[in-house]
Image (cartoon, rainbow, N blue to C red):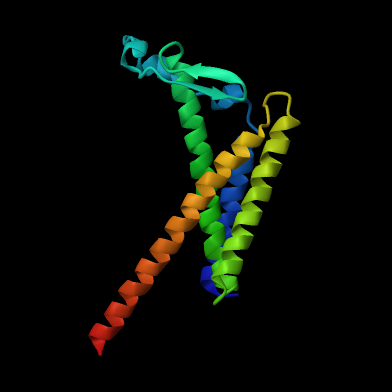
């Protein structure tokens, strides 16, 4: 196994461990509302928030009426996208080092494995007394994964192009 492949595997394993550690925490352990209340204690946050209401899992979340809930909701869903995006990017780098010359296969396996991990994460939360699992979160996770995979391939292409330019200048 190449050093880079082993490195990607090691970092990926650490990231997956981090994801499932967070997944096992209760909602209260992950809540940022106490921090938001401390930061914005002297501010009428409702005044500054846009008049937006999102519906998630059948529940309306209003920026004006419940600004702390709204901010935490946006933070949590963004965290879902980031965490699964990073997982997908790391997994793609790992699989790309194994399936050299087969980018479609590496991409497909990355998407499939990320979907499976997101599904298992939600299933774990669904079976937890302190959390609720939701299939919508899997789609949010997959959105983060798709964005990260796209960016990873763009960065790989840019690095390859830069390396080719360097090689051609040396000649």
In which quadrant of the rendered view does residue 122 lie? Answer: top right
State the residue lying farthest toward the left.
169
User: Could you tell me which residue is drawn at 59 percent across and 72 percent down?
Assistant: 98
Q: Quadrant of residue 126?
A: top right
- Foreground of the two, 158 or 129: 158
Q: Nearer the viewer, residue 65 or 86?
A: 65
What is the x, y in percent for residue 135? 66, 36
Question: Compared to 91, does 137 lie above or below?
Answer: above
Residue drawn at the location 47% of the way across and 52% of the way down: 148
Relative image position of residue 89 (x, y in whole percent): 51, 56
Name which residue lies at 54% across and 18% down.
60
Image height of 53 relative to 120, above or below = above
Above/below status of 171 relative to 138: below
Could you tell me residue 112's position as x and y percent?
A: 65, 55
Task: Out of 131 and 81, give the one closest to the viewer.
Answer: 81
Query: On the picture, is 137 further left or further right than 71?
Result: right
Residue occupying the far bottom of the picture: 171
Q: Position of residue 30 (x, y in %)?
A: 55, 27
Q: Nearer the viewer, residue 126 or 130?
A: 126
Q: Report how many numbered discs are placed on residues in the image.
A: 0
Q: Residue at x 56, y 64 (%)?
A: 94
In the image, 160: left or right of 77? left
Q: Residue furthest right?
A: 127
Picture quarter with the C terminus:
bottom left
Q: Quick one: quadrant of the N terminus?
A: bottom right
**Looking at the picture, does residue 126 appear above or below residue 141?**
above
């Amino acid at each position: 196994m190449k050093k880079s492949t082993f490195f990607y595997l090691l970092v990926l394993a650490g990231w997956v461990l981090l994801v499932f550690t967070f997944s096992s925490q209760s909602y209260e352990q992950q809540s940022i509302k106490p921090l938001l209340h401390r930061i914005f204690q002297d501010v009428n946050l409702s005044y500054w928030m846009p008049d937006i209401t999102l519906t998630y899992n059948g529940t309306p979340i209003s920026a004006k009426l419940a600004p702390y809930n709204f901010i935490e909701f946006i933070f949590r869903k963004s965290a879902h996208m980031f965490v699964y995006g990073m997982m997908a990017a790391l997994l793609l780098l790992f699989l790309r080092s194994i399936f050299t010359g087969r980018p479609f296969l590496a991409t497909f396996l990355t998407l499939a494995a990320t979907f499976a991990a997101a599904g298992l994460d939600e299933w774990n939360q669904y079976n937890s007394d302190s959390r609720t699992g939701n299939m919508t979160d899997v789609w949010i996770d997959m959105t983060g994964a798709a964005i990260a995979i796209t960016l990873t391939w763009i960065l790989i292409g840019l690095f390859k192009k830069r390396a080719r330019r360097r090689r051609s200048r040396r000649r």
